[in-house]
Amino acid sequence: MKKLAVLGICVVLALTVLAVGCGEDEEPVTTAAPETTAAPETTTTAAPDTTAPPETTASTAPPETTATTAATGVEVVRDVIADVEPIELSFVSFLPDVPPGSDWNWDFMNKVSEYSGGAMTVKFSGPEACSPMDVPAAVQRGTFDLGSILSMFGDTMVPLCAAVGRAEYNPIELRTPGTPANAAYKYYEDGYAANGIKYLGASVSSEAQVQTVFYFGKDINTLADLKGLKMAAVGGSNQAFIEELGMACIPIDFTDYFTSMERGVVDGFNVGIPGIEDYGLTPLTKVMLDEPVSSCGGMMLMNMDKWNGLTDKQKQVITQAMIATEYDNLKHFNDTVDAVKGRLEAAGVKILHLSPEEAKTFYLAYRDTMWAQDIKDFPEEGKLLYDALVNPDFHRAK
């Protein structure tokens, strides 16, 4: 139930997810993740032809073919690689083909086609072809070559995959060798490799993205106003945080948010920023507390045997496309969030920013309660990831 809770929070973009299997019925073979002291058949939905990809809103490519991120020195390369051997790869996502959730998938797939000069194509399937939580197992078995997952779905193979959504570094920083944050990238890479999966990268950001916020049906102005309120959430690890703020956590399914707000069963709800629109809750909302917490961490995975069978140039295309997708989505997700806020303000919803002192108190309460639970559940892995993903200079903790 805890995992489904977090799924509900993050998958606010998915409209209806069908609980169907992915091919074979056997359980995934799970191999223990490497010692953490070393920080390091389905019916698919036809996708647009990626050999002539439509213009995607997920990526605004700069004019140069190579960019270097100022913070890390990691190159974002956009070269078209010559003489790539043709191949079609199958791809399954935990999200349906509905923007903005599907934008990350299509940005990656379109880049694979573009950077290979059209030689490499990717055929998309959504949750109608595979239950979202089964995607890692389907990729492991080779039912699909590639898979896009909500990070928590990997927890059964690699403990604390969900923690990547709380990274206080962006994905490009995580993959930069020689940095403390890179220990987390290596942890996930080695953990998935032990289970026959190539970890390609993540779609998270330390800044905005589609993060979780609190919405309220009554006016609030300070943290003191939260005490005694009833907050709808699916519980899970967010429950300790909600209670730390003096609110009561009322476990309600996301599809019941509207009725619960309308009847006064709860005073507010906890959901990803665009979720207020997905569930039609804007008319019942007076305040958005614009102090985001967990990011909807996503991961891109590939079957290891398929990866090992690629040519060097094909691997170069995949890697180049993944890094460029991570880089471009830092801006794209911020734009998505800004657009939602604009529509809320136009509808009369107050966007509340806490005072600097209260904002720090709010964020540290979130950080401390979430990591305390992870370290309690997985002491060694939790400590490694805490050291890697918590940024001592992160502005929200200052």
Image (spheres, grey):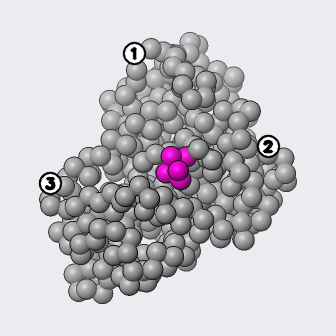
Alpha carbon distance from label 3 to label 1: 34 Å
The quarter of the displayed image where residue 227 is located: bottom left
Residue drawn at x 34%, y 33% is: 56
Q: Amino acid at mark 1?
A: Pro
In percent of width and height, residue 5 lies at 50, 72
Magenta region's main secondary structure?
helix
* Residue located at (67% from left, 42% from top): 181
For the residues bearing labels 3 and 2, Cβ distance under 8 angstroms: no
Q: Secondary structure at mark 3?
A: helix
| Kind of residue at badge 3 | Ala
Is residue 22 part of the magenta span, yes or no?
no
Identify the residue position indicated by label 1 in the image: 63
Magenta-highlighted residues: 394-398
Q: Residues within 10 Å of mark 2 (few under 14, many from 20)?
A: some
Disc marking residue 40: 2
Q: Which mark is residue 346?
A: 3
Q: Is residue 349 left or right of residue 120?
A: left
Instruction: Work out whether mark 3 precedes mark 2 in sequence or the reverse, and give the earlier one.
Output: 2
